[in-house]
Image: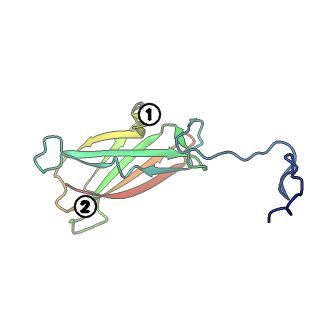
Amino acid sequence: ALPPAGASIDPQARPLGAASGPTTTRRLSLEQTVPGDGGATHIVINDARTACLDADADGRSEGLIVVFEPRDADSRLVACGGDVAVAAFDSAAPDANAALCGWQIPAADALRNFRRTSRDRGVQLTLPWPGPVPAGDHVRVVVRMTTPEGGVLETDATIPAR
């Protein structure tokens, strides 16, 4: 409610319930990167950058480009590494729970592929198909990262196969 007309307004006044002294509230910034000290609580696949790779534009996928972001509890990007496992599942496979293929990426390689520019953020992996390409229209990608502390973070996304 507004004060009555003609009432003086105290510029130092605080809303009811406001704490006196320093506040511990932090402003959320998804653009901010925090140093990696084990603060990742979850990982997020970047749907806009994760795709099947068709480098020669022949309509056949040569592999996957997987981009995922380790995040802290405030959803800020965390610069941390860990062993990464990626599995791909073909939507046309008779057994939807059987992986088409998988890759193991050591922590050092994952950290080397970490980017934090305004355009490229997170761990970016280019993974060629080790065998047959997916026959279906979509591929389910599962990413699992084991943090240096031994925690396991997992996420998945479904992307077009072509």
Looking at the rendered image, the disc whose residue lies closer to the viewer, 2 or 1, is 1
Residue at the front extreme?
6
Q: Is residue 21 rendered to the left or right of residue 148?
A: right
Identify the residue position indicated by label 1 in the image.
Answer: 117
Q: Quarter holding the N terminus?
A: bottom right
Compare marks 2 and 1 and give the one earlier in the sequence: 1
162 shown above or below 127 = below
99 shown above or below 124 = below
As shown in the figure, which amino acid type bears the numbered disc 1?
Thr
Give the residue displayed 60% in from the left and 49% down from the top: 74
Question: In the rendered image, is residue 129 in sight?
Answer: no
Q: Is residue 35 rendered to the left or right of residue 121?
A: right
Q: Secondary structure at mark 2?
A: strand
Label 1: few (<14), some (14–19) or many (≥20) C-alpha neighbours in 10 Å: few
Identify the residue position indicated by label 2 in the image.
Answer: 138
Q: Position of residue 84 (x, y in %)?
A: 41, 43
Give the residue displayed 35% in from the left and 50% down from the top: 48
Give the residue displayed 84% in from the left and 46% down from the top: 11
Q: Residue 57: which quarter of the image? A: top left
Separation of marks 2 and 1 at Cα, in angstroms: 29 Å
Q: Position of residue 92 (x, y in %)?
A: 20, 66
Label 2: few (<14), some (14–19) or many (≥20) C-alpha neighbours in 10 Å: some
Q: Quarter holding the C terminus?
A: bottom left
Q: Is residue 3 rendered to the left or right of residue 104?
A: right
16 shown above or below 124 = below
- Residue closer to the observer: 118 or 64: 118
As shown in the figure, which amino acid type bears the numbered disc 2?
His
> Which numbered dot is residue 90?
none
Q: Residue 18: which quarter of the image? A: bottom right
Q: Secondary structure at mark 1?
A: loop
- Residue closer to the observer: 146 or 58: 58
